[in-house]
Amino acid sequence: MLHFLFLLLLPTLLFFLHKSLSAAGGGGHLPPGPNLCRILTLKHQIEQNPRKLFTNLAKLYGPIFSFRAGVHLIVVASSAAAAKEIFSTQNLRFAARYLPAVNHSILRTTKTRLPAAIVVAESNAVWKIVRGLGHRSIFSAASVEAAAGIRAAKAAELVEFLGTQIKEEKAVFIEEIIFATFANIISTVLTSRNLFLVDKNGENVRTVINRLIEMAEKYSRFGLGDMLPFLRRFDFSTKIRGRVVFENAKSIWGDFVMERKLAMATQVEGCSKTMTRDFLDILLHEDLFADDGAIEYFLSEMLMGSTDSVTTITIWLLVEMIKNEEILQKVRKEITDQAVEAGNTISEPGLAQCEYLQACIKEALRLHTPSPVVVPRLASKASIINGYTIPKNTIVLINLWAIHTDPGMWEDPLMFKPDRFLNSPIAFKGGAIDGAHFEYMPFGGGSRTCPGSEICRKGVQLMTACLVHYFDWRVPDGNDRAVLERGEDQFWTILKKDEPLRLIPSLRGDCNNAELD
C-alpha cells in the first residue's frame, strides 16, 4: 500500500525534490548509489538489516554512496577515512541528529518545552542542557565511581539468583537476567529504587525488554511523513507509532514518577529537609519538562541507551567464550589472579587490570557492535567528503559494522580474536576519541559520541566476571554449536541474538559463599 501511494505521488515528489535540491545547492557531484526503483525493492532489507545491505552496496558504489528516501538525500559512509571526516575534521557540520517524524509525534503527546530527549535531540542549547544533566548525574567519572557499590550489590543479587536456579537445574534466559540486573543498576542511579525483583519478575522483565525493543523499532523507522513532509499531517501510521512509544514509556516509569511526586508533596507539607536528591528529583525540579510524560520518555531513553549495550555485549562475549574454551580459561585465570580477593570476592578495580578480559570486551564491541549503524546525523552545512558534495540537510549514516569488519583494516575480520587488542594503541572508546584509530568506533564519535561508554565497560566487565568466574554454562539438549551460532537480529539501533539465549548454569569449584566487593 505504501509503495502504491509512493508511486501515485511520484510527480509531486519529483517537484519537491527539484525544489529541495535547488535550495540546498545539491547540484554538485553527489555520491553514486542505487536509484529509486532499486531502493523500493530493498526497502525491507533497509528496515531489517541495514548494516549488511549497506556493506554490500558499498562494495558496488564505493565507501560513500547515496540514495533518495522521498525528499531526503541519504549518504552512507562505510570507511574509516570517511568516518574521520564526519566525526573529526568536519564534526560540527555533522553534530546534529535527524529526528524521524515519529519523534515529533511522540513529543506532541506531551506539553513539554523540550524539543527532544538526549538520544534524538538536535545539537542546540537545550540538548546541551539535557546532556549536561545526564553527564553530571550519571556519566561523569565521579558519578560512575560513586555507583560502584550499587553495581556490586546488584551483581551479588545476580549470583544469588543463579544459585537458586542451579539447585533446580533450570535453564535461564540469560538476556533477561543480565538486562534485569543492569536495569536495576541504572534504575537505582536514576530513581533510588529497583526496576525489577530479579528473582520474582521474569515475566515482567521480558515485557519491559519487549516494550523497549518496540520503542526503538518504532521511533527509528522512517514513515510516509519522513519521505513526503507535506503529507505529514495525514501520516496516521506514524502518529500511531508515536502513541505506542509514549504509552510504553509511561507503562515503565509512570508509577515511579507519580510516587515520587506524591512523596515530594508530602515532604514539602511536612517541611522535611531529608528529601533524596537523585536524578528523578532533578528532572522534576527542572523547568525543561512541563509534564510527567516527557520525564517518562526521557527516563526510557536513558534506560534503553544504558542497558542495550551492556546486555548485548555481555551475551555475545559469553557466547564467544563458550565457543572457545581456550579463551574462556584464559579469562578465568586472569580474573582469579588479578581480581579475586579474600572470600572469593570480585574486585572491580582488579577487573580493570585484567588486560585479556579488556581485550575480549574490545573485540566483542568490534565484532558485535551494539549500534552497528550510527543514529542518523543531519548535515547542518554543505560539505565536501572524499570529493563528493554533501548538501545541507542531508541525512548521514555511518556503517560502523562495515568499518569494524573491513578486511583492509583487520586481519580475519569476522573471527573473534581478542589477542589483536593486546598491546594495541587503540583505546577502549576507539579512534573517535583519541583522534587516531577510526577503524574502531564502538560508541560513535565526534561531539555526539555515546556518553555512557565507561558505564558500559564497567557493566560488561562485572557481569562477565560474575558469569564466568562463579559458573559453568551449557546449552539445553546438548545442541551447543547450533544454538550458539544462531545469528543476529537488528533494528536501526539495536543488534542482538535473533532468539533469546537459554543456558543452564552450574557452580564452579568452591563458590558457595561467593560475595562481591
Image (tube, rainbow, N blue to C red):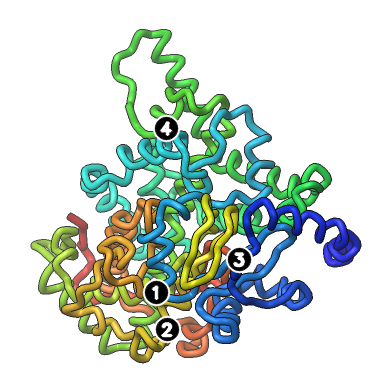
Which of marks 4 and 2 precedes in the sequence? 4
Q: Mark 4 points at which residue?
A: 280
Which of marks 1 and 3 precedes in the sequence? 3
Frontmost of labels 2 and 4 is 2
Which of marks 2 and 1 precedes in the sequence? 1
Frontmost of labels 4 and 1 is 1
Frontmost of labels 2 and 3 is 3
Tell me the number on the disc at residue 406: 2
Q: What element carries label 1?
A: helix
What amino acid is labelled 3 in the image? Gly
Q: Mark 3 points at which residue?
A: 28
Q: Do the residues labelled 4 and 3 touch (CB within 8 Å)?
A: no
Q: In which quarter of the image is residue 21?
A: bottom right
Nearer to the camera, 268 or 215: 215
Frontmost of labels 4 and 3 is 3
Q: Dot 4, how many residues are within 10 Å of its Cα: few (below 14), some (14-19), or many (20+)?
A: many
Q: Is residue 305 left or right of residue 252?
A: left
Nearer to the camera, 7 or 374: 7
Tell me the number on the disc at residue 80: 1
